[in-house]
Image: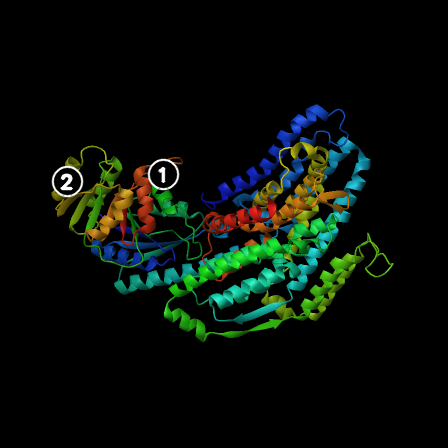
Amino acid sequence: MHHTKQSKPIAAICILAALFISACLGAHLWGDTNVHDSHDAHMPHLWYIGILPFIAILGSIALLPLLNKTRHWWENNLNRFFVAMLCAVATIVYMVATSGAESIGPMLDHAIMKDFIPFIILLFSLYVISGGIYLSGDLAASPKINTTFLAIGAGIASFIGTTGASMLLIRPLLKTNSQRKYKVHTIVVFIFLVSNIGGTLLPIGDPPLFLGYLRGVPFMWTLGLWPMWATACAILLVVYYIWDSILYKKETPSDHIRDGMQLEPLRLRGGINFLWIGGIVATAALVDSAKPLVGTDWTPFPYCRELLMLFFVGLSLLSTSKAIHTANSFTYGAILEVGALFSGIFIAMQVPLAVLEASGKTITESMNQPWQFFWATGTLSGFLDNAPTYVVFFKLSQSLPEGEMLAVNDGSVPVLLLIAISLGSVFMGAMTYIGNGPNFMVKAIAEQEGIEMPSFFGFMFKYSIPVLIPLFILITVLFLL
Amino acid sequence: MIKRILVALSGTPCTSSAITHSIELAKLHNAALTGVTVFDPDRLQDVGPVPLGGATAAHELGEHRMALAKEQIEDSITEFEKACCDAEVKNRVIRETGDSAKCLLNDWRYHDLTVIGLRGLFEYGVLHDHGDIVLDVIGDGLRPLLAVSEQYRPIQSALVAYDGSPIAARAMKAFCMLDIWKPMPTTVACFKGQDGDADKLLSDAESYLTSHTIPTTTKRIEEKPLNAILEEMYACNADLLVMGAAKRMRLGRKLLGNTARFALENSTRPIFLHH
């Protein structure tokens, strides 16, 4: 009768976002198809049917967890995998029917062997290894300490991933602030900084950037985004410090006294896992089967990088006590979920990518500025998963051979547009709870600790829109115009 | 005649006050109390939209909420039974599982008055976004309803918000005819935006209440009820607000529906609502 007052509008927003992509694509391509259909060999035949599995899987992710009738069914990873495979098989059937059976091999090679396997192994490695690090403690919850927590989180998120950094720091931050009344703003800014923006500097920081890396963006290229990262982090930290200082003064003296009496020094357990994470970073940066290992003539064999990552996972599991995983409430559920769904997403998105490849020029006649790519990628990343969103706009940007270009696996990409897409997909994941996986994880942990977190729309209208939109406008003006 | 009172044991800060008010009324009318708890798994597990990779966290949050709700239900029942036992009031407890509003409406059928806490129903301190559930149950026919605030405050005077509409008239008449409280000093207030002549409405209402031996004064307020209704209740030191609540419309809520919603969300004193 009243399954969440918000579910229906949110489901509607998500479905509208998915439909928006297809409608925009359709509006641009319909005319294009009519004009070029007969002589454009790359445009997939009946493309508007071919993109349906992609829309279906994104729609399922948005809708099925919200409905009472499907919520429990969707909780099972096997059922998610079933939906993903259904969409994948539908894509394969479509491709066989329209392009012949010979098109399946290259498509699967691209989707599974080159995208899915490296992607999921990196996420799995970071997930497992960072799950072996446990930080405990209860510091004095002053604005200075809280700001330092956030700054450290924003600093390490690029190196251990936004999920790893969030899970590492959220519990001690919550414990530190447990005696304070005003703490929601701290969790919200934590989501902004640690769960999203902090992951800008390396491909392992946030999944979409790793997909860029798999497409040929150099590992160190994202380090060049440091001015935007530093600007966003500095502004948010200053805003937070002022905000928290004001609220700190509103706490009662008894809250301050209780906070001062329940201090516990920070204690790091499983620190050896930082070494294994260093191994992952080095492996991701140096081992690529497409080129010789730095300083040698030896070219790593295919999946050497992934095997090395799994090796570090093995070392982590061997060197980490079960008690640490228990303290972190570590399970494989989240990564299995990601694996189950992305196995289908990567296949289902091949048709939309082919459509973009064929007709990108038509779309980019009206959308060709970095700021447009930043806001378009970002807006969709706020509601849909940012990894496929990044790939879609990455492919689209390749239709615009203007300005400085960066060579990637299948051609080149305009540098300014790549900056815009990277920033949009990472930064604007912070706009909603569903913009990035760790956002929701942080919210869930905070609620379990008894914190009254804002609702979906409360988060947007009270926090992300007033704080982040002005920041993103500033980023646009400073770097993308 | 009040013989059976239904008390929603919601595990919120208002629950203790609801129990106290109910016991007071039960003693006044020699009535029996029924405490009802509702365990609503669908509502408790509804954690909103979940991003890719967040399903495990969502599941854990749902389980955590259900475990907490179960604890709160037991605590509420214990508190209710002890309070009734101490006051020597006849009582029983109904444990429901299912949709909160449907369960409450189901149990309401055989009771003369329902007492709930302001701002929410059966959240057990777990859900913070209660939405419009109280207005939903009123809209679905639950009446009369006493929604009480967190702080217990004996009810010794009332403010009747009256705009001449049939809904407001029904609330005023229920307040008189049910004799829930002993006659108490009552102010009838007419706000801006009422139907018809305000002075005549006030005069007619005063005459009606006086015929029920209720000492009545009237007040005309040149502000819309949404802005002034609670301020007026505090200004005239009324312990109870009597008002009608229109069924909410999907688009364009009726005036009093919005006012009732505002009052339910913001009042720090009890509200007697009748739809």
Which amino acid type is shown beneath numbered disc 1? Arg
- Check whether the beta carbons of the residues at disc 1 and disc 2 lie within 8 A of each other: no
Number of marks drawn: 2
Q: Is the residue marked by circle 2 packed among few (<14), some (14-19), or many (20+) residues within 10 Å?
A: some
Residue at which label 1 appears: B248
Closest to the camera, between mark 1 and mark 2, is 1
Q: Is residue A383 left or right of residue A182?
A: right
Percent position of residue B172, x then y = 21, 42
Q: Quadrant of residue B165?
A: top left
Kind of residue at disc 2? Tyr
- For disc 2, the marked residue is B208
Q: Quadrant of the N terminus of chain A?
A: top left
Q: Which chain is mark 2 on?
A: B
The residue shown at (50%, 56%) is A188
For residue A229, above or below residue A399: below
Q: Chain of mark 1?
A: B
| Dot label at residue B104 | none
Question: Which secondary structure lies at badge 1?
Answer: loop
Q: How is the image coloured?
A: rainbow
Q: Nearer the viewer, residue A329 or A469?
A: A469
State whether residue A441 appears in this view. Answer: no
The quarter of the picture where residue A51 lies is: top right
**Left or right, A302 with reference to A151:** right
Distance of label 1 from label 2 (alpha carbons): 28 Å
Above or below: residue A107 compared with residue A294: above
**Residue drawn at the location 26% of the way across and 62% of the way down:** B88
Front residue of this view, candidates B89 and B131:
B131
